[in-house]
Amino acid sequence: MNPKVSVIIPAYNTEAYIAKAIESALEQTLTDIEVIIVDDGSTDKTVEVAKSFTDQRLKVIVNQQNLGVSAARNRALEAAQGEWIAVLDSDDWYAPERLEKLVLLAEETNADMIADDLHLIQDGATSPWSTLIQESGQNIDKTLQIDIIHFVETDVYGQVGLHLGLSKPIFKREFLVKHGIEYDETVKTGEDFWLDLKCLINGARFFLVPEPYYFYRSRTTSILHQSKLLILNQYCIATNSFMQQEVVKKNPALIHALSYNLAAFKKNLAYFEVVVPIKQGKWFIALTEARKNPHFFPYFLSRFNKIIERRIQYYIMGNKSAFDMSYNLQIKRKTTN
């Protein structure tokens, strides 16, 4: 008999964290589960740690080379047999009751996908500093159905909002199989957002639970702290590609929402095309980019107060996580690679 939930954990060089992730999955109050780890070519002891667990519900798959988080998750999806698919990043963890609570609510609401709030916790901290919903500024105190327009409009780069692209829904596997939905392996960042969007464009019933059962760890070595230019370029490409789909073109409200997101990506890309060379001491390149982009200086001035505030927090107040917290919410996306 197939398990109720398949927990899929893509992993890459997370030997210091993965044991906590695995333990949180295996110690769920819902015991009818399988846990599938796909190691994506780790060069540390991630595989050794994963294989040290003897629970029969655990399966470890090893990629001989690093293929990227989307490919790793797709390999886990192919192996999964559960009625529901739950994603867990290898440096995050679940509250013990998470799967039991979400499956029960999913069945009550006839959901195809259902997400909870996220505890936001800094690496090394002993307790969360906030939750995703708290940071959104929205007052959500009951289970809420999320439609595709609301999903896109509240997940705009650099703006306050729900940012449900960060959330980790559980998915009805039958729905994913029926519509041939999997992770886009050409997308290296923001893969959760695009999978959710694929589900919604195919008519998925998506619900958000206001209670947080997922602990989302922010690490300075995650992809969030890699090249902003690379990330923003990929977001622009992915958004343009999605907008070219015929089913999307037939939805003017969705096109409008995605266009707004794309404009935000482009504005920030133009900004960082100047700022990044300045930080690298490449003044000629920075000046050239600034001259090409007449909107740089107005946008820089609009960000100036926040820039100063972060530096005061970091250098004067001694808040060493000031940049990490802001960056985590602004960039929005994290992967395990």
Image (cartoon, rainbow, N blue to C red):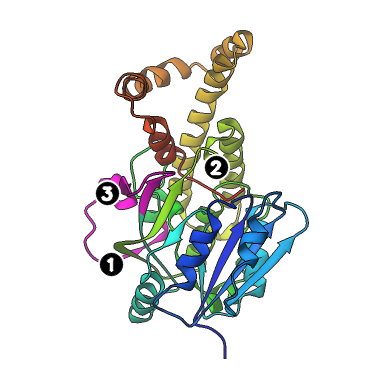
In this orientation, does residue 13 appear? yes
Quadrant of the drawing holding the N terminus? bottom right
Which residue is depicted at the point 63% across and 8% down? 284
Tags 1 and 2 in contact by the CB under 8 Å rule?
no
For marks 1 and 3, give the CA distance. 15 Å
| Label 2: element kind | loop
Is 123 one of the magenta-colored residues? yes
Q: Is residue 305 left or right of residue 224?
A: left
The amino acid on which the numbered mark 3 sits, given as a three-letter code, is Gln
Tags 3 and 2 in contact by the CB under 8 Å rule?
no
Q: Which residues are magenta?
A: 119-148
For mark 3, does the 10 Å Cα neighbourhood hold few (<14), some (14 to 19), or many (20 or more) residues?
Answer: some
- Numbered tag placed on residue 134 in the rendering: 3
The amino acid on which the numbered mark 2 sits, given as a three-letter code, is Ser
For marks 3 and 2, give the CA distance. 23 Å
For mark 2, does the 10 Å Cα neighbourhood hold few (<14), some (14 to 19), or many (20 or more) residues?
Answer: some
Mark toward the viewer: 3 or 2: 2
Q: Which residue is mark 1?
A: 143
For marks 1 and 2, give the CA distance. 31 Å
Res 72 quadrant in image? bottom right
Q: Is residue 266 above or below residue 260?
A: above
Among numbered discs 3 and 2, the one appearing first in the sequence: 3
